[in-house]
Amino acid sequence: MTLPAGWTARRPTLDDVPAILAVVHAADTFAVGYPDFDAEDVRAALTAPFFDPARDSWLVTDPDGTVVAWTAVDNPTGVGRDFVEVYVDPGRGADLRAPLLARMLDRVAERAAERGLPALTVRSTVFPPETRWAGELAEAGFTRVKRYVRMTRSLAGLPAEPPPPPGVTVRPLRADDEADLRLFHRIFDTAFRDTPDYEPVDFDRWREQIPASGKVWDEWFVAEVDGEPAGALQSSDQALDQDMGWVRTLSVLPAYRRRGVGAALLWRAFTGYAAKGRAAAGLGVDLTNPTAPVTLYRSVGLAEVRWTDMYERIVPAAGV
């Protein structure tokens, strides 16, 4: 990658967290209108499993030593596809995004070879204002494969939680009971196996990943129908800085869909968020999900506020 005179590219360290965060905040503000990352998110990215900052990340600084771009590869499970982020200061680093993407694709090719794979699928996201980035991804061989929608609802004046349908009960997860955690994982794993992009993760690895999304245990729930496990809801603390409760996953076993289980879980979560004084609730939904959850979400008062497109390409392994 050729840089302008006086600009440099180097590998990041944890000492760079504040400078990286400044770049990410500038990029987020341009893309979604507000900062969507905090310092702990940056530290988590730099110390994530299956990520080596000395090989999987770059920083670019201008002649004043100010960081204007940061790249990273994300793959918390070490299986399946890689996800590439290229953050740039939109005012000073826009011209760097395409060449940094090319450099990261070279690294993905190396990662594929290191895993003994003939090729590796890589993805990256595009938000509505990022028309230039969408074009650069297309020029690099990416195609748009799906759209995610962010949905939210206000919790001001939230109605009383409606009674669940006959036979349906909702209870908190017993987080100190490994059997209940295993049950939660089994519901989640089974429910998501009929979605297009689900990559199964065994219980031990799933449990290891939980801290990344926050252990807000009193906001995790299990639903039963006539005493049998039927669904589960996992909350995350990822939107607390927006005064919002966030539904990370909603899982309903196939045999219990269209029976009010999902709505009962959502109402219980909304009621819990409101009791803590949260202003709103939100979640993200994959529009390619065959269970068509958008209809359910609208029925409990959630509305679409923003879309995100996912782009993808296959990268042959280095040396192939």
Image (tube, helix red, strand yellow):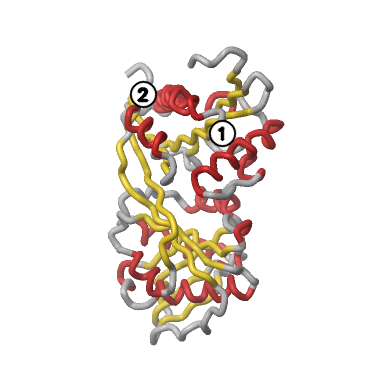
- The residue tagged 2 is 317
Q: Considering depth in this image, is 187 or 11 the residue closer to the camera?
A: 11
Residue 186 visible to the viewer: no
Q: Quarter-wise, where is residue 240 in the image?
A: bottom right
The amino acid pointed to by label 1 is Asp
Q: Quarter-wise, where is residue 257 in the image?
A: bottom left
State the residue at coordinates (46%, 80%).
169
Residue 306, given in percent of the width and then of the height, sits at 43, 55
Residue 301, given in percent of the width and then of the height, sits at 43, 73
Quarter of the C terminus within the rendering: top left
Residue 94, given in percent of the width and then of the height, sits at 50, 29
Residue 286 vertical position relative to residue 57 in the rendered view, above or below? below
State the residue at coordinates (54%, 39%).
27
Q: Considering depth in this image, is 73 or 143 the residue closer to the camera?
A: 143
Q: Secondary structure at mark 1?
A: loop
State the residue at coordinates (33%, 28%).
139
The amino acid pointed to by label 2 is Ala
Q: Is 165 left or right of 88, judged from the image as shown?
A: left
Residue 259 visible to the viewer: yes
State the residue at coordinates (60%, 56%).
214
Query: Going from the N terminus, do you reach mark 2 or mark 1 first?
Result: 1
Residue 309, given in percent of the width and then of the height, sits at 37, 46
